[in-house]
Amino acid sequence: MRFIGRQFRRIDQEIMAIPGRAIAFFFLIAMFFIPLATRDPYLMKILIFMNIFAIYAASWDVLGGFTGQFCMGHGAFFGVAAYTSGILNLKLGLPVWACIPSGAVMSVLAGLLIAVPSLRLRGVYFALVSLAFPIILTGIVYAFSGVTGGEMGLSGIEVITRNRVALYYITLAVMIACVLAMRKLTDAKSKVFRLGIVLRAIHEDEVSARCVGVNTIRYKLLAFSISAFFAGVAGGLYVHVLRIAGPSNLELMWSFNPIIWTAFGGMGTIAGSVVGVFILYPVMELLRFVPHLRILIYAGIIIAVIMLMPEGIVHWVRDKLEEECPRCKLTNSALRRDCRACGAPLHVQIKASFSSESEASTVSEEVP
Amino acid sequence: MLPIILIKGAMIGAVYASLAVGFSLVFGVAKIINLAHTAFFMLAAYAMYVLVMMYRWPVSAAVGLLLMGMSILAVLVYLLFLDRIREHEGAVILVTVALGMAIQEILLLIFESTFRAVEPFVHGIVELFGVTVPKQELLIFVVTMACLAAVLLFLYQTRLGLALRVTAQDRETANLMGINVKWVCLVSVVMAVVLAAVSGAVVSPTLTVDPYMWAHPLVMIFAAVILGGLGSVKGSFIGAFILGYTEVLVVFLVPTGSFIKGSVAMLIMVVILVVRPEGLYGVVFEEERL
């Protein structure tokens, strides 16, 4: 009983007190109860894909948003895992639960291979070079069409389970596990992993990070492997849900989509990628009612969002709902008057009053 | 075999060069990565189709109107979209991709995905080194080379060209010296779009015009520009010819060449970058070296 009580107190103090976390918490609970409300197969399918793409977009965020390696070829990781998983399943007859992890491991190897030329490049160079890798992979797929199926791709891959609701819960569980793992790994305030703060440092200024003794090469390789691993998990799941893998998984748009989702939701916050997927993917599905205008409207949305909210939705919402305590730096709800831990007033307004010519300006702190 | 590869490669290289130089110019001066660059190329090809094939305009009048229209479009795109987000690289990449997609979709709505063809502007063939070359292909080579020469003359012989080169070297100092950086960036964007429009107009008779034709040249000019060193006009020019010849070699010598021509170009780019991270003619500042 005491344990349950402690957990409730923890939820009350650490989740409910911060609006952003509270929204995420209620969102997760709602996700668990969706199959009770509806079991429409089409809706279930969309939700399953949303879960998978949330992993994919979040894995881009680890590399692009946190480490500052603006990777434009993320589809390569997804594609390697998808093809590995599919080939292992079709040609060797391995069970699904062996295929997906081996696909993810293969994707990590591909990530390390891609990282080797990329480590010497930075900024725009890296962005444009990373674009090359899915295209090179497409060439490999066409060149070895005996194994990869060439233009037709692989079909008839074993599905994880035929039961859609079970499939939904499996992908949801994997999504939550992966997203939480990525969030913990990249948390800059974490006291367990040093990774988060180092990746931020590399993002801000790589030369300075090297100057203070960080082995940036090792950390970048680590970021590449983590990102590739989770993209690989998404790729493996995708293949075993849709049951086909093809060169379309290596197309340009497949690599741009996680960037668009993450930029829409907010870069450098794993939550942003999830939010981006859960808003934009259903919108894309709704737009199927107007198939001619679908991509045009999508492009319009992207442009509008970036022009209006260049930071992304999560940052924008956070600015409105949350307030950092000026004394102890704890995050508080913007509705509170004073900090929940130290009691310092939150909304301190600094007013500059230009009263007369003799006094230049007096800065007074007003407590509301 | 060899002469035909040489001639075809020169033709394709010239087209890529005129696209890559424009792309490189915009990146060098305005620091904008314009992924919609080849969408303007495609737009020009469609404009030629509409004006020449549907309304039967004379080619010269069509090109004149096309250049005017594309310049206005470039100014609008720059002022409405690119100028506000110029500082954020990621945002620029996303917005220009979205623009390219929007252009593609608008063309799909109007023309649907059927292949269109434009009649050659000049008919007849010439015999060069024992290879029969259509006069249209010669025209492509001559026109794009003339345009590139004009761009170089402009950059190195006029005061505005000097301003462009100065801004490319150091934006802050150029601003302090009284150069209107925004205006200079606008000029570079318009120049690049006009270059793309001219090459798109001249090439249109040799290509099948369809709403997806912008993807392959985009990938190739990327590779060319990075190969030569971002922001270096000379580098992009040479990179474009290297890739043009590679593409022709792959298509002619490898059985399923046209499927993997993009991949081979990318592989060459990656190999060169591993050896020389700043590209063939790129400049690297000491503090940026790892």
Image: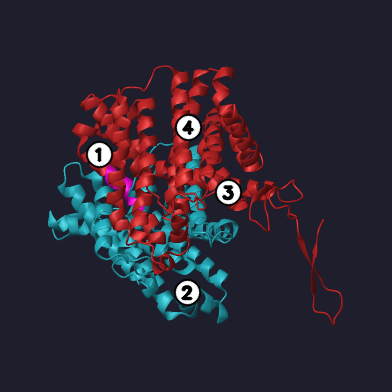
Chain colours: A red, B cyan
As drawn, the label of residue A312 is: 3
Q: Tell me the quarter of the picture where residue A75 sits.
A: top left
Residue pointed to by mark 2: B164
Q: Residues within 10 Å of mark 1 (few under 14, many from 20)?
A: many
Mark 2 vs mark 3, foreground winner is 3
Residue pointed to by mark 1: A141
Residue A235: horizontal and vertical position, in percent? 37, 35
Q: Chain of mark 1?
A: A
Q: Residue at x 48, y 44 (%)?
A: A183
Residue A323: horizontal and vertical position, in percent? 68, 51
Give the magenta range.
Answer: A130-137
Number of numbered tags placed on the structure image? 4
As for residue B73 lying within the magenta part, the answer is: no
Q: Residues within 10 Å of mark 2 (few under 14, many from 20)?
A: many
Q: Tell me the quarter of the picture where residue A16 sits.
A: top right
On screen, residue B65 versus residue B156, left or right, reads right
Q: Chain of mark 4?
A: A
Q: CA distance from mark 4 to mark 1?
A: 27 Å
Three-letter code for the amino acid on which mark 1 is drawn: Val
Mark 1 vs mark 3, foreground winner is 3
Q: CA distance from mark 2 to mark 3?
A: 33 Å
Does the CB distance between marks 3 and 4 fall below 8 Å?
no
Residue A341 seen by the camera: yes
Q: Residue at x 47, y 24 (%)?
A: A169
Q: Chain of mark 3?
A: A
Residue B284: horizontal and vertical position, in percent? 36, 71
Element on which disc 2 rests: helix
Q: Tell me the quarter of the picture where residue A254 sits.
A: top left
Does the CB distance between marks 4 and 2 fall below 8 Å?
no
Element on which disc 3 rests: loop
